[in-house]
């Protein structure tokens, strides 16, 4: 059985999407909740953690010297109720799979991050957010109930307002450290079509870009901006603001009306693992930024499919390989609404340090939820993609200080290098979360490289 | 854990008063303070090292360690790992000895062999075992270019380093599947207390410069490095120089 202790050949080297800091663990692949419970009960002294599709950038789904439970075999969609929008799914189902299954019923996942290659369990554990956060909040807001295997091997059903609601909210955003989510019921939204009506605005400097998002984001269900962090001078932070609403049937052009719920998400190519370090440098970064800016002139009311609007990178498989063998990191933080100035300061520091970030995403968050470790809170969230190289550690430590002094914090699903102190400062409710977690896992069975590195438990 | 940009949280220095070893610890500590375990014989130098690292914000533990007391090694390594995972372990102890005495006096030769080779192998096996259990870690061994080709002027020392070098190079392969990176470092002539008063060889370097090479190797998971880097090519050439010429070289 898959949860038996380790023959050597199950030892696998694991890393996150950023391809940094690998470690080796015994990987088991259970097929049902009973096998998950057995895998938890049979964990050795270095504990156990669940892993989904490995899209976290850092190390939350690694457990050096311990056990890692690969959840991707628990992948059944148990039911979809078209009328109520309720779906009942295993935790190993990916957002991609669920979307493909639910769309024909006119159902839409309200929270979609930058990739659909995320499991339901991972989406709950990181309490992920998407471009619709200012309207719909984060993933945990849409979970009606979840089934959690805890350290004692028990299988508990939790709801947001039920008797164990504290454990429910500690699990949302809890990075897998309260137990293993094996199943969940989610409430989806109704849509008439799978298309968006997109307004694109090319804006030639950062201040105007942020000003526009502050003014009329509420008119749109989805809103995000990409900007150029390479160009300096008066056009510093020039960017593309893309905002959209779901297209209704009558808004679709004639030829799309036949199949309004068609899921248009091709994968055209997979990047081979052959790139040397340094592919992203000042020159290629400048070219990329120029092309990206030019390809998106201001235009309103354009009909786009899900890949065009939400997930342009999903067209290319394993795109993280393009960064070469040293990997890269994503630096994502949120600061309060009044501290939008931090966005500019951070960008200026990055540029001054000679670092190149090609994928820069800026968004205004709406209200947060009740989960003590949930990342989103009202304010500005900025996400930078930087290849690992000399001096990056010092630069990021500097940025940490700026972000934390402004009352901000870091996103654990992207985090791969900060200090325990930075997380403690950024998440003032950490101790409250620890209490809930200590009650449900007194022996510390659930552990990950991240929990050791950031001293989360 | 070592993070995405190569910052460790803890480091174990075997040979806790080694100048190069302490420079390595400081190279990491200058980026971020960490937990340091110094394994060495008690001495004022050890106390001074401890105070200096604590001044940098590090938490320092000391473990009594005598390289020649092989029977105690199990206990030393056990104590060194008692405080939690060791992310980086540096095997930095060693004796230079007196070559003329060493090749004519068996006791002195054995002393060099014991400290530089036997003891290094002993702690290597024990640390490897703990890191295997951890599933991660970086183990650094300070070898020497003297081990790459024996020279008349220091071949006893060179032979011990050749043995250490071969052992840790093999350990690199053995530990790879377990998520542990072993790095063999081959410094040239380093200005330290050990080499005080000796005539410096070409491309001589300092403990701080060697430490930068080591820190960079750990961060980028390199398995074999020279300090300074150009020695790699110098030694590659020297290994192939015919003996009649080699023995006439002023090195």
Image: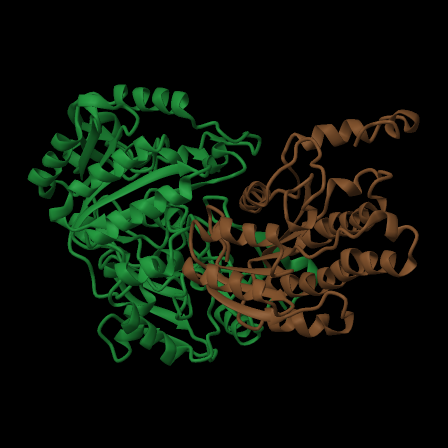
Chain colours: A green, B brown
**Along the line of sight, which residue is nearer the eye, B199 or A239?**
B199
- On the image, the x and y values in percent for residue B56 come to 42, 57
| Position of residue B92 in the picture relative to residue A356 (left or right) | right
Q: Can see residue B38?
A: yes
Name above or below for residue A238 compared with residue A364: above
Q: Quadrant of the N terminus of chain A?
A: bottom right
Residue lying at 18% horizontally and 33% vertically, measured from the top left: A197
| Position of residue A27 in the picture relative to residue A201 (left or right) | right
- On the image, the x and y values in percent for residue A254 come to 21, 26
Q: Residue furthest front?
A: B197
- On the image, the x and y values in percent for residue B5 come to 46, 46
**Along the line of sight, which residue is nearer the eye, A375 or B194?**
B194
| Position of residue A352 in the picture relative to residue B24 (left or right) | left
Q: Quadrant of the C terminus of chain A?
A: bottom left
Residue lying at 84% horizontally and 38% vertically, measured from the top left: B151
Name above or below for residue B105 compared with residue A6: above
- On the image, the x and y values in percent for residue B244 come to 93, 26
Q: Can see residue A107?
A: no
**Along the line of sight, which residue is nearer the eye, A352 or B99?**
B99
* Image quadrant assignment for residue A383: top left
Q: Residue furthest left?
A: A215
| Position of residue A53 in the picture relative to residue A12 (left or right) | left
Residue lying at 38% horizontally and 56% vertically, measured from the top left: A419
Residue lying at 32% horizontally and 39% vertically, measured from the top left: A384
**Along the line of sight, which residue is nearer the eye, A167 or A361?**
A361
In this rendering, the count of numbered labels is: 0
């Amino acid at each position: 059985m898959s949860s038996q202790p380790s023959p050597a050949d199950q030892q696998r080297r694991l890393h996150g999407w950023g391809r940094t800091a690998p470690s080796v663990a015994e990987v088991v692949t259970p097929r049902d909740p009973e096998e998950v419970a057995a895998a938890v009960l049979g964990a050795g002294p270095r504990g156990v953690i669940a892993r989904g599709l490995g899209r976290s950038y850092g190390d939350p789904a690694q457990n050096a010297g311990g056990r890692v439970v690969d959840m991707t075999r628990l992948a059944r969609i148990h039911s979809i109720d078209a009328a109520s929008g309720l779906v009942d799914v295993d935790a190993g189902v990916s957002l991609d799979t669920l979307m493909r299954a639910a769309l024909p019923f006119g159902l839409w996942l309200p929270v979609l991050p930058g990739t659909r290659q995320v499991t339901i369990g991972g989406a709950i554990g990181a309490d992920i957010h998407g471009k619709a956060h200012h309207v719909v909040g984060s993933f945990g807001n849409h979970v009606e109930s979840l089934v959690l295997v805890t350290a004692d091997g028990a299988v508990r059903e939790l709801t947001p307002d039920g008797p164990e609601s504290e454990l429910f909210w500690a699990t949302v955003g809890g990075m897998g450290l309260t137990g293993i989510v094996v199943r969940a019921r989610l409430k989806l939204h109704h849509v008439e079509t799978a298309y968006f009506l997109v307004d694109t605005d090319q804006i030639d400097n950062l201040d105007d870009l942020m000003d526009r998002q502050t003014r009329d984001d509420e008119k749109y269900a989805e809103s995000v901006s990409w900007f150029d962090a390479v160009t300096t001078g008066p056009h510093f932070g020039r960017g593309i603001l893309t905002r959209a609403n779901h297209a209704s049937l009558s808004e679709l052009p004639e030829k799309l009306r036949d199949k309004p719920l068609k899921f248009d998400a091709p994968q055209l190519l997979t990047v081979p693992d052959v790139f040397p370090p340094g592919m992203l440098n000042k020159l290629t970064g400048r070219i990329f930024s120029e092309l990206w800016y030019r390809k998106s002139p201001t235009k309103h009311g354009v009909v786009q499919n899900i890949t065009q609007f939400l997930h342009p990178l999903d067209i290319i498989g394993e795109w993280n390989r393009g960064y070469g063998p040293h990997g890269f990191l994503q630096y994502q933080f949120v600061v309060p609404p009044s501290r939008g100035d931090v966005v500019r300061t951070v960008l200026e520091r990055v540029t001054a340090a000679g670092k190149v970030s090609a994928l820069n995403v800026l968004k205004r968050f709406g209200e947060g939820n009740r989960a003590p470790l949930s990342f989103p809170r009202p304010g500005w969230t900025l996400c930078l993609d930087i290849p690992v190289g000399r001096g990056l550690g010092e630069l990021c430590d500097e940025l940490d200080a700026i972000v934390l002094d402004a009352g901000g914090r870091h996103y654990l699903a992207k985090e791969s290098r900060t200090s325990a102190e930075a997380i403690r400062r950024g998440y003032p409710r950490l101790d409250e979360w620890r209490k809930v977690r200590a009650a449900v896992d007194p022996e510390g069975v659930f552990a990950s490289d991240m929990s050791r590195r950031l001293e989360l438990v | 854990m070592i993070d995405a940009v190569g910052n460790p949280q803890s480091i174990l220095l075997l040979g806790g008063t080694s100048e190069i070893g302490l420079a390595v610890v400081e190279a990491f500590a200058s980026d971020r303070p960490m937990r340091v375990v110094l394994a060495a014989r008690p001495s004022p130098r050890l106390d001074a090292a401890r105070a200096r690292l604590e001044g940098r914000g590090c938490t320092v533990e000391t473990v009594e360690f005598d390289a020649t007391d092989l029977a105690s090694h199990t206990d030393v390594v056990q104590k060194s790992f008692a405080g939690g995972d060791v992310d980086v372990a540096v095997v930095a102890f060693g004796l230079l000895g007196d070559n003329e005495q060493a090749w004519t006096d068996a006791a002195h030769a054995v002393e060099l062999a014991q400290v530089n080779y036997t003891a290094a192998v002993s702690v290597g096996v024990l640390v490897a075992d703990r890191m295997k259990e951890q599933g991660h870690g970086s183990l650094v061994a300070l070898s020497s270019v003297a081990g790459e080709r024996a020279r008349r002027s220091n071949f006893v020392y060179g032979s011990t380093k050749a043995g250490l070098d071969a052992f840790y190079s093999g350990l690199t392969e053995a530990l790879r599947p377990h998520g542990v990176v072993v790095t063999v470092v081959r410094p040239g002539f380093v200005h330290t207390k050990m080499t005080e008063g000796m005539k410096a060889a070409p491309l001589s370097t300092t403990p701080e410069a060697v430490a930068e090479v080591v820190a960079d190797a750990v961060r980028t998971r390199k398995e074999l490095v020279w300090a300074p880097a150009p020695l790699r090519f110098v030694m590659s050439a020297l290994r192939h120089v015919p003996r009649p010429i080699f023995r006439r070289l002023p090195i």
